[in-house]
Every structure is written in structure tokens, then in C-alpha cells.
Amino acid sequence: MLVSPAFIFVLVFFVLPLIFLLSQSVLPEDGGFTLSGYVDFFQSRVSRIVYLRTLKLGLIVTGICLAMAYPAAFVLARMPARRRSFLMSLVILPLMTNAVARTFAWLIILGRRGMVNQTLLSLDLVENPVRFIFTETAIVLGLTQLFLPLMVLPLVSAMENIPDDVLEAARSLGANRLTTFLRIVVPLSSDGLVLGATLVFTGSVTAFVTPAILGGSRLLLMSTLLRQKAVILFDQHAAAVVAVVMILTTLAVNLLLRLGRVRQA
Amino acid sequence: MVSRWMYISLVILYCFLLGPFIIIFMASFGANATMAFPPQGFTLDWFANVFETSQFIDSFWVSLQLALQSTMVSLIMGMPVAYALTRFQFAASGLVETVFSAPILVPGLVIGFAMLNFFVLLGDMHVMTGLFIGHTAILFPYSVRVISASLRNLDPYVEDAAVSLGANRLRGFLLVVLPNMQAGIAAAFVLGFITSFNNVPVSLFLSGPGVTTLPVSMLSYLEYYFDPTIAAVSTLLVIFTVLLVQTAERLLGLSQFV
Amino acid sequence: MPHLEIHDLTVSYEKHQPTLERFNLDVEQGELLSLLGPSGCGKTTTLRSVAGFIQADAGRISINGRDYTNLPPNQRDIGLVFQSYALFPHLTVFNNVAFGLRMRRIPKGEIYSRVTNALKMVGLEDFADRRPAQLSGGQQQRVALARATVIEPQVLLLDEPLSNLDAKLRVDMRQEIRRLQQQLGITTLYVTHDQVEAMSISDRVVVMNQGAIEQIGTPERIFAAPETVFVADFMGFDNRFSAAVESVQGDKLSVNWGGAPIDVRWRAKVGSPRPGARAEVFFRADNANLRAGADASGLAGLVILHTFHGNEVRYLVDTQVGEISILQDSAGQRFESGAAVTVQPQTQKWIAIVEEREPLA
């Protein structure tokens, strides 16, 4: 009784559209049931490249976020509560600002006359401005900045739960700082790691704003490909296929990582 | 246990997280229209430009209205769900939980695309209505989660205590449970508002002629112009968000719910 | 030469920890020494300094002649048992115990036999594959003990190891720790705030207060002959009164108790007490008798409360020197509230402590 209004809302306005989307991807307007949309998608060189590029950049971004967040999260988790809550609010702040604003900063940094190029030119390291915009590097930087907090937050909350005693026990048994970190802190924060990696990876492979601004139509990812098919090419059938592939990818990643976590426990 | 190089990593992290904001700030006051860096001179022209561009003003009001409405409705629908999920074990509770958390798992862009196609199928729907439905659907799981978290912190026996003292279930809920949910509800409201206000993927497809949200109109402005006006809008938005988040953090301890 | 030497140890600031100033302590080879005191007395600071988690400002810690003062904790040859056990939740019991051996790069085969042996010693050989979360509190405690001792450390440190267990288990574990310690002949520092625990387990007890040692000695000696008011209070002397010293003869002094003079053994910080000095007199509830009715054999009083404790009954008696707590055999004569009684002192076990300096004559 309590859940019914919400249940009906989600059913009608969320589940039904998705079912319709699924049907669109297998039922082109001019014919019966067919999987040709999916076959076309994976046979087309362009869409295959886009798909693999999306996964590749997602992995790179996840890796960089992990490398940057892990040691920093440990420092944050070991801080006195007052200082930690201040620093954590600074981590959350970017999360609360819209992606357009945050990605725009990279145009200023990486643009033809941006910060990096001005520096390179003034140091005579290059003769002409280097093109950074519309490169994979730009997208990776933008996405990393966007999703870094999603890696820091779960890691910090996992590491907060490791008692000081446990770390001291490892030290008293002869483990040095690095060994303690690798053999105690890392395994004990694996839940946070898995959650953070899931959030960052799925966020990266489905993000739209950053690839749209920093990759444009020259360097498509799945999200910008979906937009192109739907709005510019008006091919709703092909767009639906892209959308379903995106859903399946994120679901698969979530399931995989969740399974990994269950087996570990 | 914390060694020096770990502190260095902390500094790098914060440079990376906050550096872009500093650059946006500087660019929004620079007199140089071509966005060269470092900016030359000082001007407030770009801020003036923001307020003279009707595209931004109109879409700001759309975003504000949309965020308020969808947050409210998602909260009103989310409260009983959170209550039911934390207090009762019922046959379908697993299914209900899965259905309600599904909108988190589906990419926002896909949600917007699927809804657009579905609404076209349903026939003429006002753009604002479409946006409202889309935003409410994506906010809903967050409302449920945040309110559930605050309910889990509340001893379930306080309600029984109220009943044992003569209150009926409804009064027990209204007089004992609801006041203790306040912080959770307020936190959910702020988070929901910000999520909706910043959303691009869902709004992208559902926006229509003349009705656009602020982030989407910023994105389309970027397609045609490349000048510090966007930096000025961003600066204003950052200030707006900082004020909102800091107030909420101070009043409610927001970070515990994120 | 003592096995563990703490010399002039000074710890001036440590988060939420009390300070130590020029603290000295020697522990002999194979000895179990307890640091006993209320929270904040510096016992944990001492222990954590020996373990290497607190850096001393000055002084020296050495074990077996080797200077430990500036050694990081992982290079100290020490076994540490935490109040919280601090087991590694992600590792099995076996791997918890094996951790220290792996850090020491012991060969696999030897690790297996030593861990198995250590688990056998604490009776957990069948639990090797369990995770800490699947064990009871007492079992977790045993794992912590096995983990700390399997590395055959020079010194074993135990930080309130029993405070998270229930009363009955505490007594069992106490004996188990003592048995294991004697079996291994390991030099041990044992931190506790429970005087009964310290009495029952130790070779020697150190009573600490505000970062300094109040008294050090065998449990028997500290129990029977506390040297300071603090120790007497802490060692569970139920009754206390102050009185002026009337005269001193040898190891006894005479004070006035309810109008009658009594002779009590004395302890003093400096020299021997002079008449007129203030003495604090302590006696335990079982060092006085109750008789029905008022007579000249002792102090008259009225029973105001009686509580039954199985073999004994505890009475609270109101007298002219205040309320006195007295323990009597429950098989003997019983008194109701309001009964008039006489309190007969058994002064051979009473003690008078004189702390104030002699008045300048």
C-alpha cells in the first residue's frame, strides 16, 4: 500500500520506456523481429572502434582515479574528524557542480591558446600550439576530474572502518609501512575499491558532457554516438541498439564486480 | 602509518579536484575574449553578458522550477517506500528494492532517450511534463536511499514505545518517526535539488523548443561561442552551489548521506 | 641484568595519553609484571612506548641489552596483544597467526608447524580456517595470544587483554595466559586496571598513578602492605579513617579509635612518624568482628544495612567514627537492621600510612 504510488510511477515512466526501447532495437519500423541492428553495430568498423574506445578510456580513467585516490584516501581516513570533514566537503564540492562548468575549465587549460600551450610556447618547447582538444588525453583528463570524488568517497569510508589497533598489530608483528598498507589496508578496503571502481567506470563509459565538449564529433564515444544517431541521423533503430548496448555494458560491469565481491567475502 | 609521499598524493588530488575551479574563476574576470591564458585585465562584462542573454535567464528559471518540483514529488513518493523498506519485510521487498534502485543502474542519457521515444508514442506531451517525469524518476532512488539511511539510525522501538503510551500507528509515525526523519528529508532535498539542477544527460533529449534547462543551454552555447561568458555562468553556479552545500553541511551534516 | 630495562623514559605529549617523566622500570627474564592503575595513570603509555608506537622524548628502552629506543615497531622483537584483539578480519585464524612469521620470511614448512603448534597450545587447532568474525570473544582472544607468541618475541605485551570478556571467561583466560606465559618462559608486561586480575596473574605488580610508580612488589606484599594512601585505596581496603599519631613503638604506632587507643603497623614516606602527625588508617571489611549488644571490647554501633553474598554477609554499621563496612561469615550469628552491635577490631592486619612530612620541630 505504502509503495504502490511510487511503484506505479516507476513502472509506467521508467520500466515501460525501457521495454519500449528494447523493442525498438529489435523491431525496426519497417519489419518484424530482427537482431540485425546488433549485428550491424558490431560489424560496423566505426561503431566497433567507438565501443572499444569507450571501454578503453573507461579503464584508463578508473586506473588513474584509483592511483590518485588510494594513498590520498588513506591520509584522509587517518585524519582527526574535524579536519577530515572539512577536506571531505572539498571533495564533494566538485560533485555538486555541473559537468559543463567543470569540463569547460579543460578548454581553457588545453585550448590552442590555453595554459599548457602558452607554457610550452614560452619555454620554446614547441613552435606551434599543440592540439589537445578532441584528443583521448583531453577526454581522460576531463573524466578523471569529473569522477575522482566517486573513487575517494567510498575508499575513505571503507578505510575509516579499519581500527588503528589492526594496523599497529601488523606493525608489531614485523610488517613495515608498505607491507602493512598492501596486506592489511588494501584487502580491508576492497569493498570501497570495488564500489569506487564501479561508479567511476560506469560513469566514464556513459558520461555525455565531457566527450561532447572535449571529443566532439571527431572523437565519438558511445554516448555521443547515441546522440548522433538519434538527433543528427534520425536513425532511432540504430540509436536504440547503441542505448541497449550501453545498458548491458553497465549492467555487466556491475554484476561482474558484485560477483567478485561476493566470492571474496 | 601515514608517510610523507601519501601527503604529497593528497596535495595532488586536491590540485586536480579544485584547480579547474580556480581557472574558471580567473577566466570569468579576464578581459580577453579569446580565452587566452593567463587572462589579461579585469572586467565584469562577462557577468553582464550572462544576465543579458535570455537563453541563460529563461533556462535558469526552467531548471529551478524543474528541480524544485521533481525533488518534492520524488520525496513525497520516496518517504513511504523508505519507511516500508526499513520497517517491514514483505514478500516482494526484494523485487521492490530492485525496481526502485534500477534508475541508478541505467545511464542517464539512455533514460532520456527511452523516455523521449516513449512520450512520442504516448502522443502530445508538454516538454516541461516530460522533463518533470524524467527528473523525478532519476531522483527517486536517491530519495529512498537517503531517507532509508536516516531511518536506519532510528531505533525501531521508539515507535512501539509511542504506541504503548497510547498513540495509534499513524500518530506514532507522525509524532515520533517523522520528526526524526527531518534531517534525512532535508538532506535528500538538497541532494535531489542539486542532482536535478545539474543534470544534462536526461534533460538533453527531453528538452524541447523554447524549454531548456540551464546546463543544456550552457552546452549548446558552447557549440556556437567560445568566450568567457560560460566561465562567468560557471562561477555564479559554483558560488550558488557552495553556499547551498555549505549551509546544508553545517545544518545537516550532508556528507554522511553521500 | 634485567631483560627489559626502561630508563628515565620521558613522554611529554601524546594524543589523549598521559605523560611520563623520567620513568624507570626493570623486568626480569621470564617474569610477568603487571602495570596496575586507574585509566590515565600512564600504564598504557608505558606499554606503547615499549612497543614503539610512542616515540620517547628522552630516556632509553632496552631489551636483552639491545637499545630499542629508536627502533620502529616492526623491527622490535615484541609480541603485542590488544584490548580489542586487533585480529585481521580478512584473514583466517591460520593466516592471522602466520602473519608475523611471514614478515620474518620463515620457510613455509616451518610456518605451518609453528602455527599449528601455537593453535594447539591455545586449543584452537580445529579453527584454523575460520575468520575472526566467526569466533567467540574468548576464541578471538586466544588467536590474539597465539599470534603474539608464535613469533617467539623477546617480550610479550598485553594491554587490558581481558576487559572485553565476561566475568567467568575472564577468570579462565587469566589462568590460560599465566599457564602459557610460564610454559614459554616469556618476559611479559601486563597492563590492567583490575587489581584482582593483577594479583592473580603476576610475579610482581607495579601500581601506577599519574605517570609515576606508587609501589612495586609481589602481589602478596602489595595486598598486605600498601605503602601509600593511593595504593591502599586502590587495593580494596574498605574502611579508612584519619587520626593523629599518639605514640610510636618500633613498627607499630598508636592512634585513637573511638576513644580507645589501638596499635597498628605503619608505613611512612620519609623517616618514622612523630607523635601528632596525621595517619590514614586502613582496614578491610573482614578484619573486624561483630558482636551483639554494646560492650567494652570494641566500638558501639547500629547495623544500618546488610547484604547477603553467599558465604558472607556484609554489614554497614554506623559508629561514632563513621560508617564501617564489615564482612562476616554467613554461617555465624546474623544481625538485622537496627540491631545494636559492637565492632571488635583485628588490628594485626590494619595499616596506618603517614604521608605528611614531619612537622619541623
Image (cartoon, coloured by chain):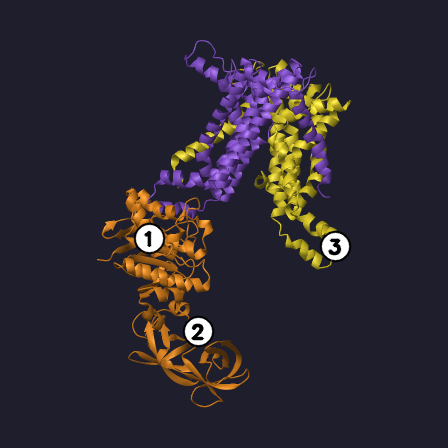
Residue A149 in sight in this render: no
Q: In this view, does A75 lie above or below B234?
A: below
Query: Which comes before the other along the chain, label 2 or label 1?
Result: 1
Q: Which chain carries label 3?
A: B
Q: Dots 2 and 3: beta carbons under 8 Å?
A: no
Q: Chain A is drawn in which colour?
A: purple
Disc 3 is placed on an element classified as loop
Residue at image coords 34%, 42%: A175
User: Which numbered tag is attached to residue C238?
Assistant: 2
User: Which numbered tag is attached to residue B8?
Assistant: none
Q: Mark 1 lies on which chain?
A: C
Q: Which amino acid does label 2 sit on?
A: Asp
Relative to residue A106, is residue C168 drawn left or right?
Answer: left
Camera-nearest residue between C347 and B34: C347
Relative to residue C352, is residue A51 drawn left or right?
Answer: right
Disc 2 is placed on an element classified as loop
Q: Label 3 belongs to which residue?
A: B168
Which numbered disc, 3 or 1, marks the residue closer to the eye? 1
Q: The orange chain is which one?
A: C
Residue at image coords 35%, 50%: C147
Badges 2 and 3, same chain: no
* Cα–Cα span, label 3 and label 1: 59 Å
Q: How crowded is mark 2: few (under 14 residues within 10 Å), some or many (20 or more)?
A: some
Q: Label 1 belongs to which residue?
A: C118
Q: Dots 3 and 1: beta carbons under 8 Å?
A: no
Which numbered disc, 2 or 3, marks the residue closer to the eye? 3
Residue C204 x, y percent position in the rendering: 31, 64
Residue A104 x, y percent position in the rendering: 57, 21
Camera-nearest residue between B51 and C333: C333
Quadrant of the rendering where the N terminus of chain A is positioned? top right
Q: The yellow chain is which one?
A: B
